[in-house]
Image (spheres, rainbow, N blue to C red):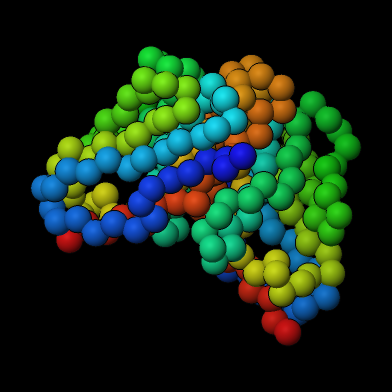
Amino acid sequence: AQTVTQSQPEMSVQEAETVTLSCTYDTSESDYYLFWYKQPPSRQMILVIRQEAYKQQNATENRFSVNFQKAAKSFSLKISDSQLGDAAMYFCAYRRGIQGAQKLVFGQGTRLTINP
Amino acid sequence: NAGVTQTPKFQVLKTGQSMTLQCAQDMNHEYMSWYRQDPGMGLRLIHYSVGAGITDQGEVPNGYNVSRSTTEDFPLRLLSAAPSQTSVYFCASSRLAGHNEQFFGPGTRLTVL
């Protein structure tokens, strides 16, 4: 079974600085997707970024980027120029790459605080 | 286009009571699922469905029932609530093909006393 581990229960960063959230996963499959979700105090789950395992290039979405290390099974999220609105729980998630395999496996989450 | 909707937003039950959490989506998604979120454990899959009339168990199915009579609706039933079912429940939906990003509802906070 696949597992996802986020070893940092809490992180904090000064506004405008850069922060990196860690995620490792375990799988025997070669085709899969990895995601970072943001959950603000409103509780809504918001997709931040997605990475396909077959792509060597790291995904980027504006101030959010990932460092995908397939051999090390590591998938970290970097937030640049942190803003107060980035404060939230962040979840790393894994999904098999087989068409129709939609089940998401989540990590435990990291609570990110932004200090003004 | 309302996306994924869930009702109620909050609910308090007594041990042994039954209730149904409602989930509906208007995006014609084949796949729908229920997750529960507990502190320090992330989201865990309860049940899922790949189409009307088809359901299957996820990681933590005990104590929950589901059915899928239409593409739009995927209710989650607690037949006899227990304090261990105190949690936040999320419904999600997606297409089965293509990029198939999962869209989440706003969640239901359930407390069982």
Q: Nearer the viewer, residue B46 or A6?
A: B46
Give coordinates of residue A6: x percent, y percent.
Answer: 58, 53
Tag count = 0
- Up-down: is A53 above or below A81? above
Q: Nearer the viewer, residue B56 or B73?
A: B73
- Up-down: is B57 above or below A14? above
Find the residue positioned furthest to the front: B1
Give coordinates of residue B76: x percent, y percent.
Answer: 32, 36
Q: Residue at x 84, y 59 (%)?
A: A63
Residue B60 appearing in the image: no
Q: Residue at x 85, y 47 (%)?
A: A60
Q: Nearer the viewer, residue B87 or A91?
A: B87
Q: Residue at x 57, y 43 (%)?
A: B2
Looking at the image, residue A69 sits to the left or right of residue B9; the answer is: right
Q: Quadrant of the C terminus of chain A?
A: bottom right
Give coordinates of residue A104: x percent, y percent.
Answer: 54, 35
Asked which quadrant contains residue A73, the reply is top right
Asked which quadrant contains residue B60, the reply is top left
- Up-down: is A19 above or below A75? below
Q: Residue at x 71, y 22 (%)?
A: B98
Q: Nearer the viewer, residue B73 or A56?
A: B73
Give coordinates of residue A8: x percent, y percent.
Answer: 59, 62
Residue B98 appearing in the image: yes
